[in-house]
Amino acid sequence: MLDIIGIVVLGFIFAILSNNTIDQTPKKRTYSTPTPYCPSCATKLSWKDMLPFWSYYNSRGKCPYCNVKLPLRHILVDILEVMWVGFYVLKFGWSYEGSMAMLYGMALIGIIFLTKEKRELSDSLLMIMGMLAVIHFLAYNPDRFPEAALSMLLGIAALALYNLIKIFATDDSTFELTEVKLGALLGLFLGMELGLVTLFFAIAGGAVIGSINVKFLDKPRDEATPPFSELLSGAALLALLWGKDILYLYQSLTDLL
């Protein structure tokens, strides 16, 4: 029972922080104010307006001040953050080291929706993720920090190469430096093995989603695949939860062959 209460409370806190961060990150601009507010009418929100699930249900999915419909993302983030904490705690239990991974996952869920809503990933958020990654290794795995640093360089190289291929192979001429930064931070936090699992899942996921969108949903090819930062964040969540299990299964299959 205490585990369930802890999961719900922590999941609700993560949901409030994630939704608040997304709402306060205007499109193509940096943070404007630390005060929670309605993205439509800019009215300051009270704590009663930010309760996960209940506030959305009580206001029928609308802002209580201007009556403008709120994005469905609010309730989706609530669900995903509670599920994320629940899956992580049930699999790994409660620990100080695990709390770092849970915080990282919270940020990744936020990044998925920030990217989906075409909002800029601020350097402030990426800096916080970098600090968590450094604390994670220096405090709990100091002997593996050189490996993490090498994995960070691999993340930079992989994302830089991806952007260069995209520029030469498509009509998109933008070099997404934010994606390179995210790749570096994921490499630093996850390490070499889980970093490679994340990269594989991101590429495979992009190929599958793109194929489905083109073949069954008739989307144009240049709009069929989600942004790579979105794919990376989703893949990193999977790697944090099941990456080691996948590596163990792969090793077992390799030994059998």
Image: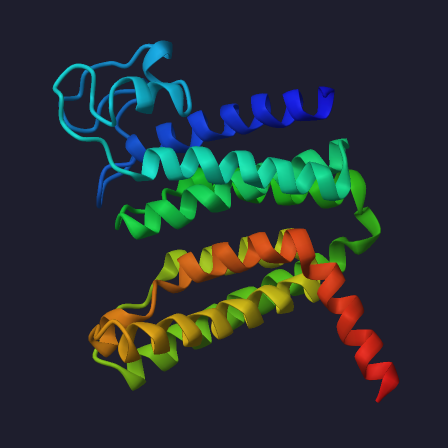
Residue sitting nearer the eye, 151 or 24: 24
Q: Where's residue 164, x and y in %?
A: 37, 78
Image point 47% across, 69% down: which residue?
Answer: 205
Instruction: Tell me the quadrant of the picture where the C terminus can be found.
Output: bottom right
Instruction: Tell me the quadrant of the picture where the N terminus can be found.
Output: top right
| Color scheme of the displayed model | rainbow
Look at the picture and state if 219 lies above or below 181. Answer: below
Look at the picture and state if 43 lies above or below 76. Answer: above
Q: Which residue is at the far right?
A: 255
User: Is residue 206 in view from this perspective?
Assistant: yes
User: Is residue 135 in view from this perspective?
Assistant: no
Q: Where's residue 215, x and y in %?
A: 29, 80
Look at the picture and state if 9 lies above or below 131. Answer: above
Q: Which residue is at the far bottom?
A: 257
In this rendering, the count of numbered labels is 0
Image point 48% across, 60% down: which residue?
Answer: 232
Image point 28% across, 75% down: which residue?
Answer: 216
Q: Where's residue 183, x and y in %?
A: 51, 60
Image point 32% across, 68% down: which residue?
Answer: 175
Residue sitting nearer the eye, 251 or 152: 251
- Does residue 185 appear to the left or right of 25 in the view shown? right
Residue 32, quarter of picture: top left
Q: Where's residue 51, x and y in %?
A: 40, 18
